[in-house]
Image (tube, helix red, strand yellow):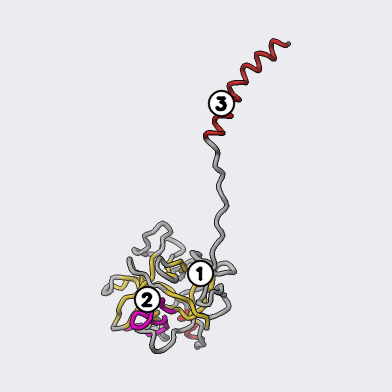
Amino acid sequence: MMKCLFFLCLCLFPILVFSSTFTSQNPINLPSESPLPKPVLDTNGKELNPNLSYRIISTYWGALGGDVYLGKSPNSDAPCPDGVFRYNSDVGPSGTPVRFIPLSTNIFEDQLLNIQFNIPTPKLCVSYTIWKVGNINAPLRTMLLETGGTIGQADSSYFKIVKSSNFGYNLLYCPITRHFLCPFCRDDYFCAKVGVVIQNGKRRLALVNENPLDVLFQEV
């Protein structure tokens, strides 16, 4: 009986030594917890509230500035203003207030949401307050931001707010499904940057490969 125990110990000893060496030299890294999402902040440092309205303003002043506003698209047959524009300067009219409608209860960075111009409007024009991305504009070689979108649907009406590499925030267009044509959506998350192009002398929000629009959010 004692001999059996002795030989059993001899057999187990190399296994124990190997196990100890493996775990000390090759520790098993358990996945860490996901970082908490960061809330988007307004110009006063307060978290954006889905129930409040904000103006989307530029991080720059003067001719480089200008708020985002709702306007009539050139050659559009829509019964209501249906274009998303930016004023040519921060000197002049204020932008059209918007509200952000997240999928969750809070507005976080890098999370899907809808954007809606929050203004009184006739019943006919309600859908013409919700942002979306239109079809490719051949003369401008890009896709323009317009209204006529939906809220909470799997279509071309989803955006994200992300931190700018300069100052403030950037807007991204992120179709919720890859079935939507989006040649500008090239990153790993199938999103595209929102910037500005010139259309008939006006600054029009559109999808761009470079120079995304840097913005801030000012509570109305």
> How many residues crowd mark 3 within 10 Å: few (<14), some (14–19), many (20+)?
few
Q: Residue at position x 55%, y 47% from top?
A: 31
Q: Nearer the viewer, mark 3 or mark 2?
A: 3
Say which mark, if any, is on residue 18.
Answer: 3
Q: Earlier in the sequence, mark 3 or mark 2?
A: 3
Horizontal arrangement in the rendering, residue 160 relative to residue 205 (left or right): right
Q: Which residue is mark 2?
A: 205
Which corner quadrant of the image does residue 92 belong to? bottom left
Which SS class for mark 3? helix
Residues in magenta?
A: 57-76
Which residue is at the far right? 1
Q: Which residue is mark 1?
A: 113
Q: Residue at position x 41%, y 56% from top?
A: 188
Q: Residue at position x 37%, y 76% from top?
A: 205
Contact, mark 3 vs mark 2 (Cβ under 8 Å)? no
Which SS class for mark 1? strand
